[in-house]
Amino acid sequence: MRVGLEDSLFIRPGKLAESNAQQATGIRRIVEDPGCEVATPGEARGILALKGGDRVDFRGVRPGRRPDGNVAHCTLPVDGGGSLTKAATMRNKIVSPAEAAALIKDGDVLTTSGFVGIGVPDQLLAAIETRFLETGAPRDLGLVFAAGQGDGKERGLNRLGHEGLLKRVIGGHWGLIPKVAALAVAGKIEGWNLPQGCISQLYRDIAAGKPGMLSKVGLETYVDPRQGGGAVNAISTEPQVELMEIRGEEVLFYPSQRLTVALLRGTTADEMGNVTMEREALTIDNLAQAMAVKNAGGVVIVQVERVARARTLPAREVHIPGILVDAVVVSRPEHHVQTYGTAFSQGFTNRMRTPAGEIPPMALDARKVIARRCAFELPVNGVVNLGIGMPEGVAYVAAEEGLLDHLTLTAEPGVIGGQPASGLDFGAAVNTDAVIPQNNQFDFYDGGGLDMTCLGLAQADLHGNVNVSRFGTRLAGAGGFINISQNARAVVFAGTFTAKGLDVAISDDGVEIRREGAQRKFLRDVEQITFSGARAARRGQTVLYVTERCVFELTPDGLKLVEIAPGIDLEKDILGWMEVPPILDEISVMDARLYRAQEMKLRTDLLHLDLPDRIALDPANDRLFLNFEKMRVRSTEEVDRVGRLVAETCAAHGRKVDVMVNYDGFQIDETLEADWARMVDALMAQHYRTVTRYSGSAFMRMKLGQVFPEARTHIYESKDRARAFLDGT
């Protein structure tokens, strides 16, 4: 039988021994409450009214009630054998915070909603903390959560960070809950750090009664049982992840958790417990968590701002049906802010669109330089995820450069489109296309839906591994990092080159290191593998590591330095601060626009708005000049557009032409090289007479020779030599 608030009996202290409620069918929780009056003795001696004074009629027993109760009729008659049977449930589920906290028993396993400060049931968490500090109960609780829920100080799950209150915690992101993390690192509680997306998806499988969830997420990271299985400390010995093989492929099995209490949050509840979320910035996993706990016979408690009359809420607006809800608590405003950064913004509800230009541009500093360089990788018409911290700046740069209409930004709690917010507003967004449940967003991510992600960079090593989850005694947690980084087509890691005290000056001349950071970030080996470079290289992922002074890329042989900022000394400012040198070959200079205050006009580059200007015809000499310098081609549509514009120019001329092509700084995705070659072959067959190509890069000349093997002798290192070849033909 499902057990909820209506299955609980509240009796006056000292009367528990006289009660036969423990033998009552459907009665699970016996709670001593000094506000209860004793019922007249009878066949069921000591049985009293339900929470809040709701009247309960028993055969042979006068109803007990609380003097301040709000009566809502509920009948639990005695059956023929003298036991109580549940015949009806409470209709008014509104209780006080203290009454809700009293429903939690020693050893219960809690699951809580929230993402940073969005959707966190702070009123409920505060009531539990208060009860524990005053009475020492409840004790030895379990806790399962997906996203980090806290402000890094006192709020959110930090309220549960008391020794004795918690016994066992499984969570995705720990950096915002240092009080709980400290207990885990010190070995005072059992703790596991698992991927946020896997926990989020696991709620659904728990609700469906499944034994657990299979996923490739976490393989070859610290979550893999071969690397510790996500355990935070030595006392956390019970496996929470198992390595399996299915049809010849390795997968990880995440077993279902036993959940007994859900602490959730919405905006409006009616008296039946139906909950809407119209003023919340996210819906997160509330529905899945409520189902998981209810189907396991647990108690679902929802914090809201306000209460409506029963059955007056629009059905399509209800996110948590009343059949899943046992109790509703109306919160004080200070415990129900929309985010920890913003008490309330209508824009974050996405029930209106905010005016353009409302979000100010970033100041030009190292953070903006990094965000700008990452923005060069944004895929036009692609789907992008931006992580917390340094990557948040990419959204601001995209807005400054007029790119938001040409790509779809997303965030893992369920935001699709629009402009994601940052800081303690992270997870919210304005002007979105949709806001979906977090578990569905991770389905999309895990299935390969992301064209690119930009994530934080705390430590990297010569193998291309990245650590963002554990640094000595500091437990940050992975959050959604593993789900996202393992499955996006392209990954850009963003962070300063060193940490702790770094001071740089940005000017038109580039970067000046005024004071170096005390902490190295590019190591021989990272402390913990949150991202596996070897796995990514094996799977052919495109991976960049972007800092304010240089850019690395992942190769099958490890980390390779590919760009350096103007003003930076290779030996002193880069190699001198790396424990192991990277692969060194040709190194380009980072784009000078990154370091200038004015807009970069990145929209022109990414949309190839200047493509017609790159095609120049000298009709008198039957010569065509194609300037592909610093041009990047990332789709078959772009290949086709180049071919079409060149063909139109040549067709209008009416005669075949000699062609000179500048490939300096040209980039094309390897998967498109064959398409590019076919496009050029078609132009040669119809419009070209002689072709010469040039690039100052030996690597590019080698690549051109591979793509156009018949033209290897006509690929030069300078414009003058290429022109001389044409002049001599």
Image (cartoon, helix red, strand yellow):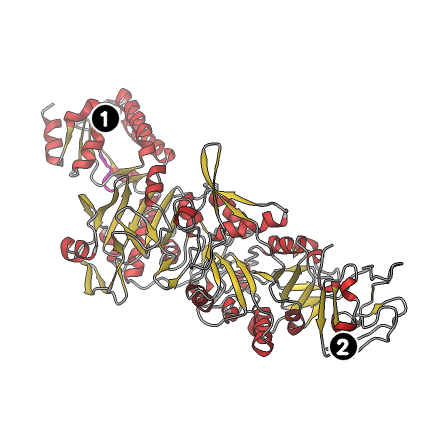
Circle 2 is placed at which residue position? 36
Q: Disc 1 and disc 2: Cα gap in Å? A: 88 Å
The three-letter code of the residue at mark 2 reads: Cys
SS category of the residue bearing label 2: loop
Residue at the outermost top position: 685
Q: Which residue is mark 1?
A: 708
Residue at 25% from the left image edge and 28% from the top image edge: 707
Which portion, as a residue range, is magenta?
Answer: 626-630
User: In the rendered structure, does residue 365 fall within the stretch colored magenta?
Assistant: no
Decide if residue 261 is on the left or right side of residue 658.
right
What's the amino acid at mark 1? Phe
Image position, residue 501 (x, y; %): 26, 67
Establish if 675 lies above or below 303.
Answer: above
Marks 1 and 2, the one that precedes in the sequence:
2
- Count of residue discs: 2
- Relative placement, left or right, of 428 versus 699 is right
Determine if residue 553 is in view. Answer: yes
Residue in front for this viewpoint, 296 or 457: 296
Q: Image height check: is 231 above or below 584?
A: below
